[in-house]
Image (tube, rainbow, N blue to C red):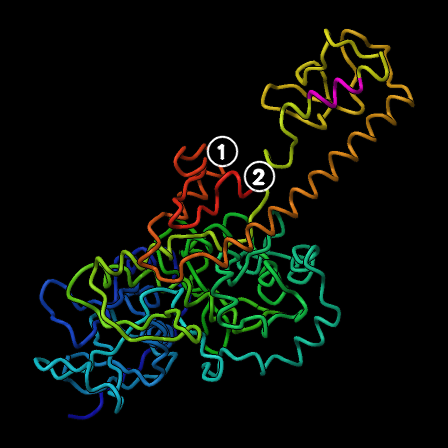
């Protein structure tokens, strides 16, 4: 049989009435080496919003399948499992139907061929965390060399970590998606909580500043875009990503939305001063959650994972059943690799310390009576400087309703400043010790996913809300087996 050719108009933004018509179409991509029965071989499903009748941009669909199939850039599509190859260009539109994604059998893969079907059971990456960035084999359209000249001219003086957000907003001037200038934020391409993946894959080479190190290596201007706050949230929820269509960076939505998809799907965007490799990283990060159904049901899957060996990390081909995937996925759910943001409560001295400072000031000045504290509720139009869980506050410029004429003396000011300086130094030392403890605990974290049983995401969420942990976990939310990165005595 001859090759099948697909020729269709390039994808364009759809009018409102046509977008609603296309909203229900889905294109299904199957793995040919697994059974068709009971949808056991559905590798990936993508909404087909690139044409009114239902279709998806061929280059985007193929790139998604190839990334999942361990960067198999020679992968191709067929309509029938044993049918001819579908010949299409990247900017063609695949009509909404089912396809099989094939990878040519390498000479070293005979042991993974099932005897029943004869199709290559090619491995897949089970998650983004196991995906190896293809440094030397990146698709041409996603390489930064073509934009090196413009990148150098635009970022002649790269900003420091502390000013990256302002630099990104100044560079992009408005939300790159909506072109609005209100409520603009910096949106990471490679998320900050993927710091461990960032390090293991040596992604710092694509930063504008190569001297950034530690927990801040993702905070680079080349790894960020300016986005409106609500669009930024949709971006982080994997609602959409950026891809290459018709030679331009284009917005592509992966999930249904009420308005954003209808307004921005297939809209070209101008991306300046960003490394395309980080855009490819974001593409993969948004795609990998879509293969969870493939991993969570059906027979054992052949996967490629990273495992810690005696001589370092190596990619290993193995099989995973749904239960094994769930154990491996415990690492995926964890966000403990993200740089820790100090909680508001951590920035304040404990209640006894607040009382001690107040008592010292009262005894030194004699101007403030112990029986007449300075509750925050009694100050109008003022912002308290320190607060405690008991609702007390100390403000350096607060005026009491009970004593409207009382002004702090110079001596009182100097005493307060002295105590505040002491508290700041103590807090700085506590922060330094906390950082050292965290680094040491991270080194000792189990490398074998089967040894990790706690849900890091839930632990972080509980910490952020101030929910106390379990007594047997030392006041944290993670067990000793997972090294209790959120234990109170480690913070």
Q: Report whether 163 appears left or right of 201.
A: right
Q: Report whether 109 appears left or right of 298.
A: right
| Magenta span | 355-361
- Classify mark 1: helix, strand or loop: loop
Mark 2 Cα shell of 10 Å, populated few (<14), some (14-19), many (≥20): few
Q: Residue at x 11, y 70 (%)?
A: 36
Q: Which residue in the protein does label 2 denote?
A: 343
Q: Residue at x 64, y 44 (%)?
A: 431
User: Closer to the N terminus: mark 1 or mark 2?
Assistant: 2
The C terminus is located in which quarter?
Answer: top right
Residue 32 place in picture, x, y as percent: 17, 77
Magenta span: predominant SS is: helix
Q: Report whether 382 appears left or right of 478.
A: right
Is residue 120 placed above or below 356 in the rendered structure?
Answer: below
The N terminus is located in which quarter?
Answer: bottom left
Q: CA distance from mark 1 to mark 2?
A: 9 Å
Q: Report whether 3 appears left or right of 12.
A: left
Q: Which residue in the protein does label 1 denote?
A: 466
- Is residue 357 rendered magenta in the image? yes
- Is residue 14 rendered magenta in the image? no
Quadrant position of residue 30? bottom left
Residue 430 place in picture, x, y as percent: 65, 42
Task: Give the farthest residue toward the right.
Answer: 410
Image mark for residue 213:
none
Q: Residue at x 17, y 82 (%)?
A: 113
Residue 362 place in picture, x, y as percent: 80, 15
Mark 1 Cα shell of 10 Å, populated few (<14), some (14-19), many (≥20): few
User: Does residue 62 appear anywhere in the picture?
Assistant: no
Give the mark count. Answer: 2
- Classify mark 2: helix, strand or loop: loop
């Amino acid at each position: 049989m001859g090759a099948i050719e697909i020729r269709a108009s390039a994808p364009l933004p759809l009018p409102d009435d046509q977008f609603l018509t296309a909203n229900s179409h889905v294109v299904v991509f199957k793995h040919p080496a697994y059974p068709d029965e009971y949808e056991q071989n559905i590798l990936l499903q993508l909404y087909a919003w690139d044409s009114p009748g239902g279709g998806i941009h061929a280059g985007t669909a193929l790139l998604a399948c190839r990334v999942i199939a361990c960067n198999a850039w020679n992968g191709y599509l067929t309509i029938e499992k044993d049918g001819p190859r579908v010949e299409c260009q990247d900017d063609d539109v695949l009509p909404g139907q089912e396809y099989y994604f094939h990878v040519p059998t390498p000479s070293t893969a005979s042991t993974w061929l099932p005897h029943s079907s004869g199709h290559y059971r090619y491995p897949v990456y089970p998650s983004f965390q196991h995906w190896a960035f293809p440094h030397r084999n990146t698709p041409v359209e996603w390489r930064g060399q073509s934009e090196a000249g413009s990148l150098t001219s635009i970022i002649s003086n790269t900003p420091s970590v502390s000013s990256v957000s302002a630099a990104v907003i100044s560079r992009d001037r408005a939300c790159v998606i909506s072109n609005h200038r209100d409520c603009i934020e910096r949106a990471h391409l490679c998320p900050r909580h993927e710091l461990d993946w960032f390090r293991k894959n040596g992604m710092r080479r694509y930063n504008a500043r190569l001297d950034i190190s530690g927990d801040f290596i993702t905070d680079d201007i080349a790894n960020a875009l300016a986005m409106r706050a609500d669009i930024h949230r949709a971006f982080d929820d994997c609602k959409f990503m950026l891809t290459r269509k018709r030679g331009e960076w284009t917005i592509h939505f992966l999930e249904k939305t009420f308005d954003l998809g209808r307004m921005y799907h297939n809209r070209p965007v101008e991306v300046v001063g960003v490394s395309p490799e980080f855009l490819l990283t974001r593409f993969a990060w948004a795609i990998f959650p879509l293969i969870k159904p493939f991993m969570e049901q059906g027979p054992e899957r052949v996967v490629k994972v990273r495992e810690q060996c005696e001589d370092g990390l190596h990619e290993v081909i193995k099989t995973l059943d749904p239960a094994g995937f769930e154990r491996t996925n415990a690492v995926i759910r964890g966000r403990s690799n993200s740089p820790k943001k100090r909680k508001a409560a951590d920035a304040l001295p404990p209640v006894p310390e607040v009382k001690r400072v107040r008592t010292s000031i009262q005894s030194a000045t004699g101007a403030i009576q112990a029986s007449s504290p300075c509750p925050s509720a009694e100050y109008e139009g003022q912002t308290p400087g320190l607060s405690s869980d008991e609702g007390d506050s100390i403000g350096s410029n607060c005026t009491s309703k009970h004593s409207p004429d009382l002004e702090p003396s110079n001596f009182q000011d100097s005493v307060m400043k002295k105590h505040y300086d002491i508290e700041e130094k103590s807090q700085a030392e506590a922060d330094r010790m906390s950082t050292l403890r965290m680094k040491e605990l991270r080194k000792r974290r189990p490398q074998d996913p089967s040894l990790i049983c706690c849900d890091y995401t839930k632990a972080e969420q509980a910490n952020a809300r101030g929910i106390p942990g379990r007594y047997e976990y030392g006041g944290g939310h993670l067990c000793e087996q997972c090294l209790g990165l959120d234990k109170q005595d480690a913070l």
